[in-house]
Each structure stands twice: as structure tokens, then as C-alpha cells.
């Protein structure tokens, strides 16, 4: 048994000849600020899907807080404290911002299956959801349908829904993707303010964001871990420069 | 200032399930019809039962986003259950109704376990297949269903042993109205509950519901079962009030027609069936009298107009109109 909040052991996934995860041994420490980077098609999002349970691994193990969750459903993993956001917003577009977060909070409180009591009478749930919106600075849009919001604001709702699950492990899949550069700062601020009780894994392309937030970085190339280290080590690593940073320097 | 707006947001959320005055309108109208149009109560009873059927479709289609082309399966199971009992000495309507609810619910549960594992077009196809299979089974099991001749010899006793079914349809109308009211009350409680809200979440984004830890399949099977039971109640009502059950109660055509009626009224609003079903059935009744050969054309034209001018059916049009008026006033 290890002390990691999240761990994968020899995690493999292939679709026919295409291998998206190749023997990935990965550990996310409690309270970690960890970034997963790599060129396009390196298998970063597949890794998130494997860990969250949206994809079943070919072989290997996934552990949450030391417990094997490899065979558990997405929902069961969420109950054990795992939450994720999506690279492309996955929101309840016709519903209001407040309702989006309320759905997540209701699930966590275990009341979402209740037929009888009106959802509006769940004061604790609604107030918790609203407090979360205040924390993220989107309470002013609480009653607007998500689809009416600008993409950058929707991105905050995407994070709010995940935070509504009060996760111990949070996987952020390119939180700043599609956000106008002027608004990236808001997202970085929100992530920086997350408490130490959350172990954070950020998948990201934006190097500015990665080097501001991450204290450890793992580089994934063609479904396998190339190297892991501190931001300084990663920035100085010649192999990383070659496959990743170098690629960006010479478009 | 911020405080005021914040409590506003949560307060609005907390008020949404409260009964609004307009929601009493259908019931006032239904009672008024009883006194104003005594000659139309037989048709009225059929309309009320069909509204209940439409309501059951709205629960799965409008709230959970399950596109079904086979809901007549459960309506038919309900109709045949009530009909079979009445033809075999169990004429008490309440017993037939409860048995129909149970059987249709069971049929919904069992088929739901298979159908709801799939998504989108597959669901559509499978609901259709279930309906066709049941209709063919009813066609073959002539000893139970009477096959193509329909179920013969139903003898329905008075409602609760007191109210005999009369020629004018007074009892039928009141009986259907009471059952519809119960069905509506159940549906209304469900859609405003946390469970009901989670169904809209499934409709809006299944992937995200999985990601927030929702047991999506279980929720879908639950609402599908409830909806099937409600459709079965509607089938039983029609069977008992018309004393007739035929194979067309299990038809795809009926499944499609009820879908059209609900869409005409507006889906996912609880009241779509209350508007779409009477509108369709009354239009059908009137048009077929005015123009017996081409009445279907006029129904079609009505549908085209409503769909062209309002995506949310009649209720969608009303909403759009109210918004425009509201803006004009400000």
C-alpha cells in the first residue's frame, strides 16, 4: 500500500494496433500540483479517461487512496473522491449555472435519486452550490442558462461542477483550452486558490500555466512516460526539449 | 446589494416547484367541459385518457431524453390486461386499472433493462422492436387477446361498485379525470424532485452525468418503468370506458401519433400533453366532419404550421409571445 492519492501500475490501453497507454506507472501525491504534458496525440486525455473510468484499461491497475478501483464504474470512482473536467465543455447547456452545479452537489449529498422532495427545498444543496459560484466569481450569472454564457465563463462552470463533488483528486483536462488569453489569468487564480486537500493533476498545453501551477511535471510521449521531475528539471531536460519544447520552438 | 441578488438566485430556485395559478387551468377547463358539453363526454373521456398517455411519453422523452417510438407497447399491455380481466369476471375498474399499471410497469422494467443500455438511434429502434414484437404476440395469442378480431365480451362493473358506466359517458369522463389527476400529481412531484432534475441532466449531457457520479442506467430504468406504468393506466382507461381492445392499441402508428401530439403541445414542460392531445383529437374530430376525405391533410398542415413557427410546440409559441410582450412593456 502506498500513500499516493492516485496511482497507476503498468497501465496499458490499446485500440488494435494503436497504443494510447503503454505501461504507465504514475503516482499523484496527496495535495499534489502535478502537470501532465506532452505533444498532441501523446495519450493525455486517454489517460484521464482511463483513470476516471470512461475507458477500460487493457491491462494494469488504478488505485485511489490505496484502493484498487480498476473494476469500478465512473460513478463509484466519483464516490471515492475522484472528479474530472473535460477538454471540451461537457455541461448541461439548457440548464442554469446554478442548476449545473446543484446537480453535482445533489449527487454528492446522495439526494439526487429522491423522487419526492422538491429539489427547491434542498436548501443545504442549493446554498452550497451557490457558495461555490461565489467563490469562482460567477454567482452573478447563477440564473442564466449555460449556453448563453461566453466560452470563458462556461469554462469556469466546467470547473465549478467538478468542485461541487468536493474531490480529493481532481483531473483538469486543459482547463484553459479555448479561453481567450485575457481570461486565462482568472482560471489560473482559481486553480491556485484550491485547497491542499485536493490532489491536482492538470493536463495542459499552455506552458505558462503549467510552469505557474505545477510543482511536478510528467511528460508523456506516445502513450509512455518519458520523464518526470520538477519544472526546473523538465525545462532543462534535453529529451523534453527535443520532443516537446523543441517542437514548439520550430513550428 | 450582492447579498440581495444572491438570495434572489437561491430563492427563485426554491420557489420553482410551487404550484402556479395557471397550472389549475386545465382542471378548471376539464370540469367546465363536463357541464358545458354534455354531448361530448365520451370523446372527452378518451381525450383525458390520451392526455395521461401523452404525459407518460413526456416523462421519458421531454425529461429523460429517451426518444421512444414504441410507447404504445405499454399502453397496449395496460389495455389488454384491463380488458382480459373484465372479460373473465374481474369487472371492477379499480382492480383492472391497478393490474394494468403493474403489468405495464413490469413490461417497461424488463424491456428497459435491455433498451436503455444503448443510446440515440439504437434506443429508437429497440423501442420500436419491442412494440412490434408485442403486437405480433397479441396477434398470435388469439385465445387470450382475440387476435385480429379484438378482445370480446368485456363486462366492466360500476366504478367502486357505485357509478355505473352510462351511455353519455358521464361516469367515464369523471373516472378518467380522476385517474389523470393522480397521474399528473405523480408526474409533477417527480419532475420537480431531485430525481427529476437529474433526469434533465441525463437529457442534457449523459457523459457529464457519469462524470459526476450519477447512476445513469438505474435512473433511466426507473423513469422508464414509471412512465410505462402510466401508459398502462391510460390503456386501461380506454379499454374500460370503450369496452374495446384491439391490436391497434399496440401499434407503431399509435406510438407515433402520441409522439406527434406531445410534440405539438411542447415536450419537457409537463403540460405539452394537456394542450397537444386535445388540440390534435378535437381537430381530428372536427376536420373529419367538415372534410371527411382529406381531413388528414388539415391535421398535417396544422402540424407543419406549429413546428415551423415554434420549436417548442404550442407552449413554446406561448412562451415566445409572452417574452415579446414582456419586452414591449419594459
Image (cartoon, rainbow, N blue to C red):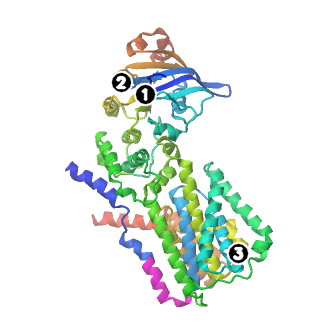
Measured in 3D between alpha carbons, the distance from the residue under mark 1 to the one under mark 3, in whole angstroms, is: 63 Å
Q: Quadrant of residue B252?
A: bottom right
Name the magenta segment's main secondary structure. helix
**Which numbered disc flags the more N-terminal residue, 2 or 1?**
1
Residue A55 in picture, x, y percent from top left: 58, 34
Pointers 1 and 3 within a single chain: no
Measured in 3D between alpha carbons, the distance from the residue under mark 3 to the one under mark 2, in whole angstroms, is: 70 Å
Query: Which chain contains the residue that carries disc 3?
Result: B
Does dot 2 land on a helix, a strand or a loop?
helix
Residue neighbourhood size for the residue with mark 2, other residues' Cα within 10 Å, grouped as few (<14), some (14–19), many (≥20): some
Q: Which numbered marker is on residue B84? A: 3
Q: On the picture, is A191 further left or further right than B272?
A: left
Q: Nearer the viewer, mark 3 or mark 2?
A: 3
Q: Which numbered marker is on residue A213? A: 2
Asked if labels 1 and 2 touch by Cβ distance under 8 angstroms, the answer is yes
Q: Please indicate, yes or no, whether residue B260 appears anywhere in the rendered image.
A: no
Measured in 3D between alpha carbons, the distance from the residue under mark 2 to the one under mark 1, in whole angstroms, is: 9 Å
Q: Quadrant of residue A180?
A: top left
Q: Residue at x 34, y 33 (%)?
A: A187
The quadrant of the rendering that contains the C terminus of chain B is bottom left
Residue B286: in magenta span: no
Q: Is residue A199 above or below residue B270?
A: above
Q: Residue pushed farthest left?
A: B1
Q: Nearer the viewer, mark 1 or mark 3?
A: 3
Q: Which residue is mark 1?
A: A202
- For the residue pair B155 and B118, the one nearer the viewer reads as B155
Amino acid at each position: 500500500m502506498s500513500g499516493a492519492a492516485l496511482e497507476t501500475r503498468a497501465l496499458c490501453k490499446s485500440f488494435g494496433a494503436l497504443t494510447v497507454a503503454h505501461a504507465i506507472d504514475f503516482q499523484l501525491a496527496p495535495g499534489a500540483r502535478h502537470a501532465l504534458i506532452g505533444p498532441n496525440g501523446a495519450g493525455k486525455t486517454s489517460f484521464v479517461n482511463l483513470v476516471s473510468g470512461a475507458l477500460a484499461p487493457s491491462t494494469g491497475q488504478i488505485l485511489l487512496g490505496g484502493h484498487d478501483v480498476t473494476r469500478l464504474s465512473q460513478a463509484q470512482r466519483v464516490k471515492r473522491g475522484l472528479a474530472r473536467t473535460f477538454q471540451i465543455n461537457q455541461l448541461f447547456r439548457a440548464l442554469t449555472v446554478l442548476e449545473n452545479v446543484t446537480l453535482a452537489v445533489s449527487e454528492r449529498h446522495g439526494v439526487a435519486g429522491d423522487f419526492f422532495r422538491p429539489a427547491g427545498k434542498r436548501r443545504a444543496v442549493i446554498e452550497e452550490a451557490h457558495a461555490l459560484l461565489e467563490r469562482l466569481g460567477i454567482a452573478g450569472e447563477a440564473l442564466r442558462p449555460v449556453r448563453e454564457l461566453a466560452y470563458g465563463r462556461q469554462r469556469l462552470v466546467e470547473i465549478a461542477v467538478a468542485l461541487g463533488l468536493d474531490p480529493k483528486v481532481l483531473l483538469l483536462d486543459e482547463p484553459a483550452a479555448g479561453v481567450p488569453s485575457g481570461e486565462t489569468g482568472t482560471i489560473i487564480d482559481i486553480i491556485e486558490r484550491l485547497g491542499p486537500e485536493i490532489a491536482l493533476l492538470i493536463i495542459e498545453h499552455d506552458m505558462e500555466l503549467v510552469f505557474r501551477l505545477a510543482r511536478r511535471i510528467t511528460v508523456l510521449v506516445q502513450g509512455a512516460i518519458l520523464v518526470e521531475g520538477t519544472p526546473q528539471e523538465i525545462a532543462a531536460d534535453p529529451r523534453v526539449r527535443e520532443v516537446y519544447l523543441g517542437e514548439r520552438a520550430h513550428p | 446589494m450582492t447579498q440581495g441578488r444572491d438570495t434572489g438566485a437561491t430563492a427563485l430556485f426554491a420557489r420553482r416547484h410551487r404550484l402556479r395559478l395557471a397550472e389549475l387551468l386545465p382542471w378548471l377547463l376539464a370540469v367546465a367541459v363536463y357541464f358545458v358539453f354534455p354531448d361530448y363526454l365520451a370523446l372527452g373521456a378518451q381525450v383525458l385518457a390520451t392526455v395521461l398517455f401523452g404525459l407518460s411519453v413526456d416523462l421519458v422523452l421531454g425529461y429523460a431524453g429517451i426518444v421512444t417510438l414504441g410507447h404504445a407497447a405499454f399502453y397496449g399491455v395496460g389495455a389488454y390486461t384491463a380488458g382480459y380481466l373484465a372479460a373473465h369476471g374481474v369487472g371492477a375498474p379499480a382492480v383492472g386499472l391497478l393490474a394494468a399499471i403493474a403489468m405495464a410497469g413490469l413490461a417497461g422494467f424488463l424491456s428497459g433493462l435491455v433498451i436503455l443500455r444503448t443510446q440515440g438511434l439504437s434506443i429508437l429502434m429497440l423501442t420500436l422492436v419491442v412494440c412490434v414484437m408485442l403486437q405480433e404476440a397479441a396477434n398470435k395469442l388469439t385465445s387470450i387477446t382475440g387476435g385480429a378480431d379484438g378482445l370480446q365480451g368485456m363486462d366492466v362493473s360500476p366504478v367502486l361498485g357505485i357509478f355505473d358506466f352510462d351511455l353519455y359517458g358521464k361516469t367515464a369522463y369523471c373516472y378518467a379525470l380522476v385517474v389523470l389527476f393522480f397521474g399528473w400529481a405523480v408526474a409533477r412531484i417527480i419532475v420537480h424532485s431531485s430525481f427529476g432534475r437529474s433526469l434533465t441532466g441525463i437529457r442534457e449531457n449523459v457523459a457529464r452525468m457519469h462524470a459526476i457520479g450519477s447512476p445513469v442506467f438505474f435512473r433511466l430504468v426507473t423513469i422508464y418503468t414509471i412512465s410505462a406504468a402510466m401508459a398502462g393506466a391510460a390503456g386501461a382507461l380506454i379499454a374500460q370506458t370503450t369496452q374495446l381492445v384491439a391490436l391497434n392499441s399496440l401499434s407503431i402508428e399509435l406510438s407515433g401519433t402520441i409522439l406527434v401530439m406531445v410534440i405539438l403541445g411542447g415536450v419537457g414542460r409537463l403540460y405539452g400533453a394537456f394542450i397537444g392531445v386535445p388540440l390534435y383529437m378535437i381537430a381530428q374530430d372536427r376536420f373529419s366532419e367538415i372534410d371527411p376525405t382529406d381531413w388528414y391533410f388539415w391535421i398535417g398542415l396544422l402540424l407543419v404550421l406549429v413546428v415551423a413557427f415554434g420549436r417548442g410546440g404550442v407552449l413554446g409559441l406561448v412562451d415566445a409571445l409572452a417574452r415579446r410582450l414582456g419586452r414591449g412593456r419594459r
